[in-house]
Image (tube, grey):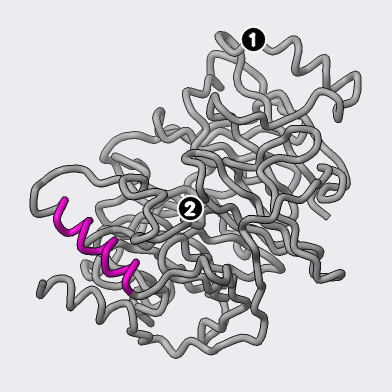
Amino acid sequence: MRKLYILMFFLGIVSCNIKEGSSSISVDLDQSDKVSIFDLADSISIVQLETTNESLIKYISNVIPYKNRFYVFDKLSQVVLCFSSNGQFLFKINKKGRGPEEYENVASFNIDNINDQILLLVPWGYVLTFDLDGNFISKKKLPEEIKSYNEVFAVNSDTLLFLSSNEYRAIYYSRKSDSIINKCLGVDEMPEIEYTKGVVYMYNDSLYFSSAGFDNKVLNMSHPERKVAYNWDFGENNFTQKQISNEMESRLKAMEERRNYSMLDNFGNSNYPTFYRSLSLETDRFEATSVLYKIPFSYLCVFRDKIEGKVNVFRETIEGIQFSYFLAYNNLLILRNNGKNKYYSEETLSPKQLEIVKSHNPDTDNPFLVIYHIK
């Protein structure tokens, strides 16, 4: 119970001067709205990634659209591949090894859009940088104090933000001074049970952290005081302290018994959290998130129209498109195929796009990207 007490203490800690915002978004998860994909997106793009001996992709872990290119990270192969806006293969970064310009393993890939650099985070204390054409720039050893981090983001021309599952959830690091300049528990990370996770998205050149655990706040991580941009309010479905305590006790028990614990183990039991929030994005028109609720592996999509103030909740669009697994970068949303979800609808595609889809051979061809240009 001592561990439980410590974790409950962590839940209330705010150690990095987070400022509250004024926007709270009320959501009824039992809504079932009829929404067309064209209520949300201006247009749809289909991009077939060129298949060559040099560009074969085992699994797309991340895609970042940047400056008319697609930078694709294949975590299984541990390579970054770059394609033009029409899918032509341009180059790849494949530097596995222990040399001064190499990496043994990449935990995180990102684009530094301030310095126009590719960032590769090695989980044993290094950040490698390359220019946008894949040319090596530097390999920087990080301070020993940073442990078990798994994501890296550029906050400004000097500062990197690391998201870590160790003692501090958010760590700000200055490249110029080679030092940690801030540490933060304000995103309610609880490392012992690895329950509260989150996703960082970019909007208007700022980084936003959207918790996927106990907390419904969305924090502006580029703001010096981590200002709360807005908060999701799920009404009677918001977690009670008792539900959180039950969840933590259940996970701690699993740890003591040395068995795996899934967030779905108690799914549907009202004594435990009633939903799990997952991915998020923001555009000039919308704030959006996906929520696992009532049906395992079937995500609700929540889109709030900033202009009209209306909140739409749906499992799929009227065309049958499901936003269960997506990658977001500014106003571009890339839906991913996990074998279960319908991530495009033929009725929404042009004849040229249909030709790409129908001629695709999943056994021999690289994947095609389905990109929704969100309003």
Answer left or right for 249 relative to 140: left
Task: Say which residue appears at 37% left-offset and 62% top-offset.
Answer: 196
Task: Name the mark on residue 361.
Answer: 1
Q: Secondary structure at mark 2?
A: strand
Identity of the amino acid at label 2? Leu
Task: Say which residue appears at 15% left-offset and 43% top-offset.
Answer: 259
In x, y percent, where is residue 230? 62, 76
In x, y percent, where is residue 59? 48, 28
Comparing 69 with 57, the one in front is: 57
Q: Is residue 312 above or below residue 295?
A: below
Task: Say whether residue 120 is magenta.
Answer: no
Tell me if residue 32 can be seen.
Answer: yes
Identity of the amino acid at label 1? Asn
Q: Is residue 9 above or below residue 323?
A: below
Q: Is residue 255 above or below residue 184?
A: above
Q: Residue furthest right?
A: 351
Q: Quadrant of the N terminus?
A: bottom left
Q: Quadrant location of residue 365? A: top right
Task: Say whether residue 243 is magenta.
Answer: yes
Magenta stretch secondary structure, dominant: helix
Comparing 152 with 361, the one in front is: 361
Question: Pointer 2: residues within 10 angstroms few (<14), some, or many (20+)?
Answer: many
Task: Say which residue appears at 65% left-offset and 51% top-offset.
Answer: 301
Tell me if residue 143 can be seen.
Answer: no
Comparing 31 with 292, the one in front is: 31
Residue highlighted by disc 2: 119
Which residues are the magenta region? 242-254
Marked residue nearer the N-terminal end (1 or 2): 2
